[in-house]
Amino acid sequence: MRHVRIVSAVLIGAVAVMLAAPGMPRAEAADAQFVLRALQVLEKHYVDPLSPPALLNAALDSAREQFHLAPFGGPIPQNADAVEASQIFTQRFDEILSQADGAEEGTAIAYAAVAGMLDSLHDSHTAFIPPDVYGEEQRRESGAAAFTGIGIEMLSRDGQFYVSEVYPGSPAGDAGVQPFDRVVAVDGHPVAGLSDDTVSTMVRGTPGSAVVLTIDRPGQAHPMDVRVTRAPIHVPRVTSRMLDGSIGYVKIYEFVDGTGAAFRSAIFGLRRDGMRAMVLDLRGNPGGLVDELRDVSAALLPQQSPFIRLRTRSGRNMMLVTPDPPILPVTMPLVVLVDEGTGSAAELLAAALKEQSRAELVGVRTAGAVEIGITVDLPEGAGMAITVARVWSGGGARLEGNGVVPDNQISLTTDAMKLGRDNQLDAALERLRDKLNAMPKGALGAPASTGRDLAA
């Protein structure tokens, strides 16, 4: 099965991917063929030329370093041809597997080998995806429940964990968990100084089971325990609400199927309620599909505005532009919140809005992880992401490794969170109030349309 991530519809026909042709034997993970087939697919679709000996040596090095196991021979010569490199790799990998403690460790060694091979390219959109992560990614993209948990996002600052988001209708929200609660302990186990993954694993669990969060809430003298029952969690596409001063707030979580339609509906709803200015929150948004990016960009930018430029493996240069007129009046003030978790499609949107002077950006430099990639299935539920095109912003800026620098650089501070404040949002609202005060009366444009865009 093929999975396409941040790929325009015009590219889909060019990137059909099959891990193995019908009738070929299925590779098992604890086998050199698992790594070699991953390399075969990578060579076929990766945007730049590759060196198989270098990649296979990286695979061997990764397996050796993570499991303290060594092949009996030396590295694969850099001048080895493809056949020779594969033969030497198979021998070396079999030597490593002979030291493994059972098939389960053999599978883990193969996973580590593929991960190391792909990581050696230092490419933000090329990576091995373990089965649990890949399954969650597929569920999120399809709109299904992505995982079992309590429906919060946490932010690590100075070794402490703060609730940065509570999903609407989530078990955490129903139990009374609030943004900027500091999580002190999970089921009685202190979390200070632990890794993000460790704390996330502690909070997640089986449906119907309970977890007790010990939280330190701004304004309360003592920590409190909150018992939450875990359930399947659907990550929202978009949430919106009206803030004081007729300022609308819209948060886009990811660019997955339906995000563009949900975003447009949110804008129409806020405009019917009298919105005079808008905050668009892209913090923590990892990106997603180009078609959804196109639809969101078209809602905000003038028609025919460029929002992405790319170069394919064949050397073809392309520019994608917004196909429709915007639904947000160009005179309506707009501020966009970004942070280090704003990546990929979200960065391209932020860049387009900044380059065309449509919005002011507030926050910190974005992730700098912007390429066109596909994902393909690997045996035993794993996946692999492959970069198939290089990307520039609509204005021609190379964002990979660089990110987007906000107009107003402000970090979300620990001091603010301890007070229950979002100082980045506060700064955005202050800028919008200044803009509204400087605008002539009646400059915000006509009411929202009730035509086909609203129905979408």
Image: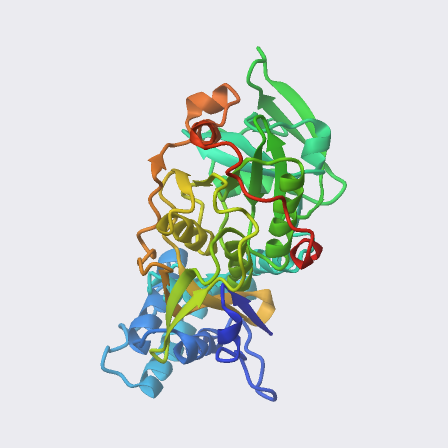
Q: Quadrant of the N terminus?
A: bottom right
Q: Residue pushed farthest top?
A: 221
Quadrant containing the C terminus in the rendered view: bottom right
* Quarter of the view holding residue 149: top right
- Residue 369 in the image, given as x and y percentages of width and height: 39, 55
The colouring scheme, among rainbow, by chain, secondary structure or one colour, is rainbow
Tag count in the figure? Answer: 0
216 to the left or right of 44: right
Can you give x and y, in whole percent of width and height, for residue 184 in the image?
55, 25
Quarter of the rendering containing residue 24? bottom right
Q: Position of residue 375 (x, y in %)?
A: 51, 68
Give residue 376's position: percent from left, percent from top: 53, 71
Image position of 115 with respect to 81: above or below: above
The residue positioned 69% from the left and 51% from the top of the image is 450
Residue at the image point whose x is 56% and y is 47% from the top: 253
Viewed as shown, does residue 107 lie left or right of 170?
left
Identify which residue, 112 or 364, lies in the foreground: 364
- Residue at 33%, 74% (x, y): give it: 48
- Furthest residue toward front: 441
In the rendered image, is residue 189 in sight? no
- Of the pair 158 and 381, the residue shown nearer to us: 158
Above or below, 132 relative to 9: above
Q: Is residue 73 visible?
A: yes
The image quarter containing residue 25 is bottom right
Nearer the observer, 144 or 266:
266
